[in-house]
Image (cartoon, rainbow, N blue to C red):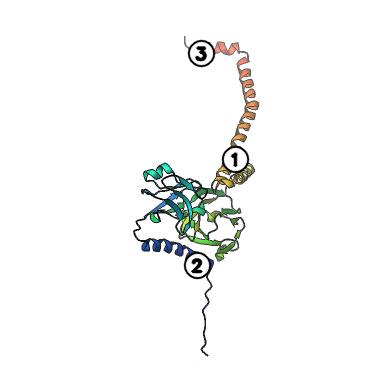
Amino acid sequence: MRDQRFLQVKWSPAAQSLMTSCRSLLFVLLLHTITPGSESQFTTVKVKLYDTAVLPCSRRCSGLASWTVSHLRSDILAECDQTSCRSVKEGYQMIHDEYLKGNLSLIISRADYSKRDWYTCECNRRDFCDVRLQIEAVTSNVEIEPGESLLLQLKISDPVEVIYNRTGSAAGPSDQICTVYGESLQSEPEYKHRTSLSSVLELRDMNVSDSGVYTVRDIRNKEDILIYTVTVTDEQHSRIWKEGYKDGYSAGREDGYGAGYQKGLGVGGGSFVIIGLAVGVILGMLVVPRVLHLIREQTEQPVDMGAAAALNQDSPT
């Protein structure tokens, strides 16, 4: 009996993600290669997180025009015909007046990371436009003290990697700190004892040499998601500044990646301004009356007539 052996291959999460990305891209390329009469236009649109995105398509359509995600052609997002337009899924819209003018653009009201993809506009089952939607990286400037932790928020389910670039005189090649696959954290050996993953990625025991640029990058799409410029300083911050920063950070977390930091900075700075004004008022109440009293005493002292006469004699006539 002939011995038959089978080779079993176990794909890593990174390899599976890469295969999924390649299949999506291959689908788009093959679709436009084998579709007769396809004259689709390829465009890339990049917007800020949560901004409105407009996917352009300037073509006249005499029949039904519709938008779909390129690899989900049966899942219509919005469509228009000569009579009216219809938003099939919430957050996606076409304008009928624009459709009649030959503007088939798709409006995405709130663009987030889940909406990053290739989109296709077709007219009467003929591809007109293919548009890729990307989200601009969110940037933040962070200042912390030695021994504190750097917290990086990860709000996408796609696999990401965290890359560190040193700044200043120690600048050199970038280092990969870790990769995150869902709830799985894989750290480089030198960072393994300092990293942990919960709702955020935590890098503990920061020191001055850790200052630099930290980038959270989407592995599948090769896109930067977050860019943190981090400064670890020896300067001691007051308790009021720290508490204000933490309160503002917590209040702003729901507004986006950078809003927490900005609100924290504003609350902390505002605390210092208020305290400065209060100290100024107190000093004014205590010091100004004392100064006025001293001036009054000087002006009310009796004049020495003998000294005045001597001064007059010394004066030239």
Marks 3, 2: nearer the viewer: 2
Q: Amino acid at mark 3?
A: Asp
Q: Amino acid at mark 1?
A: Val
- Mark sitting on residue 267: 1
Q: Nearer the viewer, residue 58 or 198?
A: 58
In the rendered view, does 239 fall on the left or right side of 117? right
Marks 3, 1: nearer the viewer: 1
Would residue 136 be visible to someone looking at this image?
Answer: no
**Residue shown at the point (65%, 26%) measured from the top left:** 285
Q: Secondary structure at mark 3?
A: helix
Q: Residues within 10 Å of mark 3 (few under 14, many from 20)?
A: few
Q: Secondary structure at mark 1?
A: helix
**Residue shown at the point (39%, 46%) measured from the top left:** 103
In the rendered view, does 293 fall on the left or right side of 104? right
Dot placed on the residue nearer the N-terminal end, 1 or 2: 2
Name the residue beneath numbered marker 3.
314
In the rendered view, does 231 fall on the left or right side of 290? left
Q: Residues within 10 Å of mark 2 (few under 14, many from 20)?
A: few
Coordinates of residue 222 in the picture (x, y in percent): 46, 59
Coordinates of residue 64 in the picture (x, y in percent): 42, 51
Badge 3 vs badge 1, beta-carbon distance below 8 Å: no
Name the residue beneath numbered marker 2.
15
Marks 1, 2: nearer the viewer: 2
Q: Secondary structure at mark 2?
A: helix
**Residue shown at the point (45%, 62%) measured from the top left:** 24
